[in-house]
Amino acid sequence: MTADAAAPDGGAAVCVACRAGRVDSDGYCENCGHAQPRERDHMEQESGPIAAVSDRGLRHHRNEDAFAVGHTALPDGSPAAVAIVCDGVSSATRPDDASLAASRAASESLLAALPRGTHPQQAMHEAIVAAAKAVESLAGEPATAREHAPHQNAPACTIVGAVVTPGLLVVGWVGDSRVYWVPVDRSTPPARLTEDDSWAAQMVAAGLMTEAEAYADERAHAITGWLGADAYELEPHTASFKPDRPGVVVVCSDGLWNYAETAEEMAEAVPRDAAVRPLHSARVLVGHALDGGGHDNVTVAVLPFPAPPQGAGSP
């Protein structure tokens, strides 16, 4: 994943740009000053039927998003797929550490709870609580000299996740990362399955602005819910759905949905063969955001939802 090269003598890494200077502990070449690619600049992962891709984008110096994907089995042997996406709050300290800690804690919690028979919606609630504790614990760790800034906020991030089991789709979130539903046959409308914890969403919910007006405001993306030691009282949102047809679940940070905000726009960006080529589709969606300007870190997980058992309802 990393493009660093080992020095001939096995010591410090050699600059990928000038191929002569050694790379210092901060990731910069001592010869030409070039910033070296970090492991998290671009990440891809497949786990069973699901896949995720994360990219630094074109404007940020590091990737403050993180994801975790995995699959397991329920007590009856039926499959369960899990995806978590976290977006670090840039105004906080160590946002990249916060997103990584949250995604790992939530995924580990889900993959432990589901095989025990915990209902997926309860498991999602517990996973978000576990993620919140993991991020809160970072506030007690000493900051590095480079990031020491007592006036800054504690490490913080948003979280969104999905669990797919036969006939059931569960989502959970805190913040403004989202989950979208796109039916495979496109015969029914796509849908956004989460509601942002944001200033814009509050304005729309209160009837004070239309959605277009709210999201055009410079305060639109100010979040009102997050994970972190200085967050308000934690209120994990969870919801469950029983889709009546096969589809694709898209779990993403705002670095993607800023370029495909409505469910219809997201469905247009999702490749038609996403259910059978999830990794390719995640790459295409990240590319969609980069082509649109790549102003933020971009992370997306794609989870196919199989044909449901007879008698299942719609989202």
Image (spheres, rainbow, N blue to C red):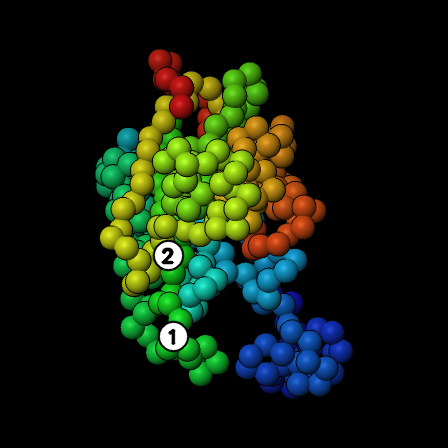
Give the side of residue 62 with respect to residue 207, left or right. right
Q: Which residue: 55% across, 79% down?
A: 26
Q: How many marks?
A: 2
Dot 2: what SS?
helix
Q: Where residue 24 appears, x then y in whole percent? A: 59, 83
Q: Where residue 139 appears, x then y in whole percent? A: 32, 69
Q: Which residue: 41% across, 77% down?
A: 149
Q: Which mark is residue 72?
A: none
Q: Quadrant of the C terminus?
A: top left
Q: Quadrant of the N terminus?
A: bottom right
Mark 1 residue crowding within 10 angstroms, few (<14) / some (14–19) / many (20+) = few
Q: Where residue 201 appears, x then y in whole percent? A: 42, 40
User: Circle 1 is placed at which residue position?
Assistant: 151
Task: State the residue lying farthest toward the top.
Answer: 311
Q: Which residue: 42% across, 79% down?
A: 148
The answer to whether residue 158 shows anywhere in this view is yes
Q: Where residue 28 appears, x then y in whole percent? A: 63, 79
Quarter-of-image position of residue 18? bottom right
Q: Are marks 1 and 2 in contact (CB under 8 Å)?
A: no
Q: Nearer the viewer, mark 1 or mark 2?
A: 1
Q: Which residue: 55% across, 16% down?
A: 187
Q: 132 or 277, which lies in front?
A: 132
Mark 2 residue crowding within 10 angstroms, few (<14) / some (14–19) / many (20+) = many
User: Circle 2 is placed at which residue position?
Assistant: 102
As shown in the figure, which amino acid type bears the numbered disc 1? His
Q: 254 or 241, which lies in front?
A: 254
Give the CA distance from mark 1 to mark 2: 23 Å
Q: 129 or 174, which lies in front?
A: 174
Dot 1: what SS?
loop
As shown in the figure, which amino acid type bears the numbered disc 2? Ala
Above/below status of 197 relative to 20: above
